[in-house]
Image (tube, helix red, strand yellow):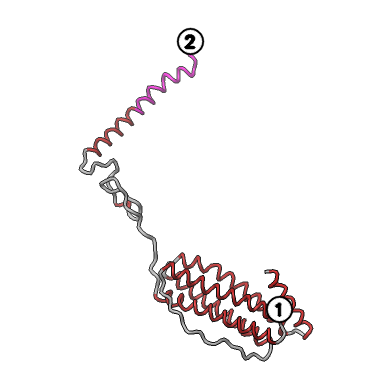
Amino acid sequence: MKFSLSAALLLVVAPTAFGLQSNYLTQLNGGMMASTSSSSGSFFPAPTETMTNTASPVSNGSFNAPMASSSTPSQELLNLWSAQVSVELSASQLYLSASIWFRNRGYPGMAAWMLEESDEERGHGFAILEFAMKKGFPVVLEALDAPRNDWTAPIEVWESIMDAEQTNTQNLMRLAHAANGCGDYAAMAFLDPFHAEQLEAEDKVSGILNKVRYATPELMAQLDYDLGEEEEEH
């Protein structure tokens, strides 16, 4: 009788593999029998000290819920968050006042641009308020001061807008710092787009301000037209 090499190997390996499998099944059955003989009646191993902060099995076979990873907001964060709602609404009022000023003085493009920004700032305020409601942050709306409207030249209007944007950037940075201080990662993630948008806003207003500062009447008319076209594209 002739045996192939593969057949010979099978005769050698199979008993060993079968023995290992049998040994494993014997140990497994023995472990299961030991578990069923305990008072809990569960196949799960008893909880160990290394299973804290995770879903750990208990004696009746059910699992404990994982430990919550929520953070407790600091009083500073709560105060700043509530105040930021009013900050955004105040910025909206300032842009609206600027829009009225430009429209009354024959700058329809700048008026439209300011009106769009007013809507955007109001939207920011509502978004921050909505996040606070979801997080359970208390919000107390503050009385808004009347926005400035006594400008005497376009350059003064744009300087006021630039100051407002820079102030808002600082407010948002303090808000992010407070959120980071108490480990509120949801708040930090929520604020990220605001920081990116503030960077763009300051850059945009700074560019317009520089043009207005050195513009002749003809260039002012062209700038007003360009800003109006920009809003129509939106």
Relative to 204, does residue 54 appear above or below in the rendering?
A: above
- Spot occupied by residue 140 in the image (x, y as percentages of width and height): 43, 79
Q: Quadrant of residue 26?
A: top left
Determine the residue positioned at 27% across, 36% down. Answer: 32
Relative to 218, does residue 34 appear above or below in the rendering?
A: above
Q: Quadrant of residue 154?
A: bottom right
- Spot occupied by residue 72 in the image (x, y as percentages of width and height): 38, 68
Residue flagged by tag 2: what amino acid is it?
Answer: Lys
**In the image, 97: left or right of 136?**
right
Is 157 within the magenta?
no
Q: Secondary structure at mark 2?
A: loop
**In the image, 171: left or right of 65?**
right
Determine the residue positioned at 35% across, 25% down. Answer: 19
- Spot occupied by residue 212 in the image (x, y as percentages of width and height): 71, 83
Determine the residue positioned at 63% across, 78% down. Answer: 115
For this rendering, which residue is in front, 196 or 20? Answer: 196
Determine the residue positioned at 48% across, 67% down. Answer: 188
Badge number at residue 2: 2
For this rendering, which residue is in front, 26 or 19? Answer: 26
Q: Quadrant of residue 159?
A: bottom right
Residue flagged by tag 1: what amino acid is it?
Answer: Gly
Highlighted range, magenta: 1-21
Measure how far apart labels 2 and 1 are at the Cα level.
Answer: 98 Å
Residue at the disc numbered 1: 109
